[in-house]
Image (cartoon, rainbow, N blue to C red):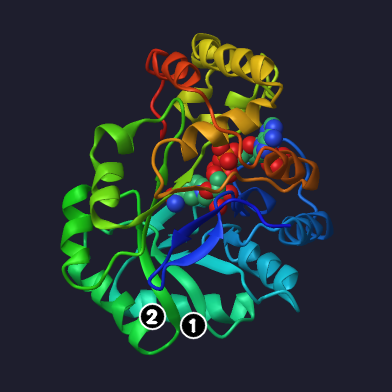
Amino acid sequence: MTLTQRSIGAAGQQVSAIGLGCMPASWGYRLEPQDDATSIATIERALALGVTHLDTAAVYGPEHNERLVGAALRGRREGVLVASKAGLYVDERLTVQRDARPESLVAGCEASLRRLAIDVIDLFYLHRVDPAVPVEESWGALAELVTAGKVRSIGLSECSVDELARAHAIHPVAALQSEMSLWTRDALDGGQLAWCAANGVAFVAFGVLGRGYLTGALPPGVVFPERDFRRTNPRFTPAAMEANRVHVDAVAAVALERGARPSQVLIAWALAQGPQVLAIPGTKRAAYVEEHVAGDGLVLSSADLARLDALPPALGNRYA
Ligand SMILES: NC(=O)c1ccc[n+]([C@@H]2O[C@H](COP(=O)([O-])OP(=O)(O)OC[C@H]3O[C@@H](n4cnc5c(N)ncnc54)[C@H](OP(=O)(O)O)[C@@H]3O)[C@@H](O)[C@H]2O)c1
């Protein structure tokens, strides 16, 4: 099955515009139990349906998510863009910390290759710029990994336009991965999306489903379990969820008119932000992957987009 394709990476590889964010299989969202066999089967289902962009990171789990992706890729590696990330780790207090020193990134790449059980990573991101390390130093180390043949292309995640430009001057930025959705417009307002368009750089949008919330699947009064990212997130307090219900309702209304699912509308909204945008909706469930893929090719009308773009800013910061 051939899905809509978009270009990404140093060689302009064509991959499915709808990729798969593999993180929920190991990290972040714990409303439902995580089961490795189910998660691997979900990734395999995505590949069978023509999804050719898998997104993971060393810190998801930590390390667990890359192993799952590696297991799912066995015998199915060809034609798949495997993206992973380095530069974050989990400390003994289970807090995520930054470490983008060159030696850490190089060691991180070797470890990711081992866990993924592949000999080259197609797209390797600096997960976060480390304030203690100039971006040029971190980026230079990633560029050397390209020269060494360990990774094919390199990207950044959640950084400023200035950091993008400084990195790009040393080695081409293949992709920027940042949160972008109906209720998170930072990359539109901060100029990152426009910078990517102007420089022929792919923009990989994460969180397009509002971490599940914007689909309407989270019931009012939901209590998030320990170690669920949303438990302490300002956007998921009862008051914020109540105030932001206007976003859920608008998506549901567009979906109803279109005969589509809310998730499909949310993905279509992200892809409508520019031809350089790719989406990586995250899930550990095959049924959700099937739903996303079934919405491939959905194009929202300018009236739909205007209605969604007129929504008020979301209540609550997107990070604690
Ligand atoms: N670069 C970064 O800093 C960064 C940060 C966060 C995430 N990411 C990447 O981006 C990917 C996507 O972001 P995300 O996973 O955080 O957020 P997301 O895609 O907005 O939401 C994922 C959540 O939505 C739920 N969901 C998925 N499909 C659904 C559907 N059709 N209907 C109802 N609920 C649905 C999932 O449930 P289940 O858990 O039950 O499957 C999961 O809890 C991640 O997987 C990760 O690879 C990158």
- Seen at 29% across and 49% down, the residue is 197
Front one among 59 and 54: 54
Residue picked out by circle 2: 106
Q: CA distance from mark 2 to mark 1?
A: 7 Å
Vertical comparison of 135 with 254: above or below: below
Quadrant of the image containing the N terminus: bottom right
Instruction: Tell me where residue 282 appears, x and y as whole percent.
Output: 61, 45
Camera sees residue 119: yes
Vertical comparison of 41 with 147: above or below: above
Pick out the residue farthest to the bottom. Answer: 148
Residue picked out by circle 1: 110
Q: Quadrant of residue 139?
A: bottom left
Image quarter for ligand 1 equals: top right
* SS at circle 2: helix
Labels 2 and 1 touching (C-beta < 8 A):
yes
Vertical comparison of 72 with 211: above or below: below
- Seen at 55% across and 13% down, the residue is 250
Front one among 6 and 290: 6
Camera sees residue 226: no
Q: Is residue 114 left or right of residue 97?
A: right
Ligand 1 near label 2 (Cβ, under 8 Å)? no
Q: Is residue 176 left or right of residue 50?
A: left
Ligand 1 near label 1 (Cβ, under 8 Å)? no
Quadrant of the image containing the C terminus: top left
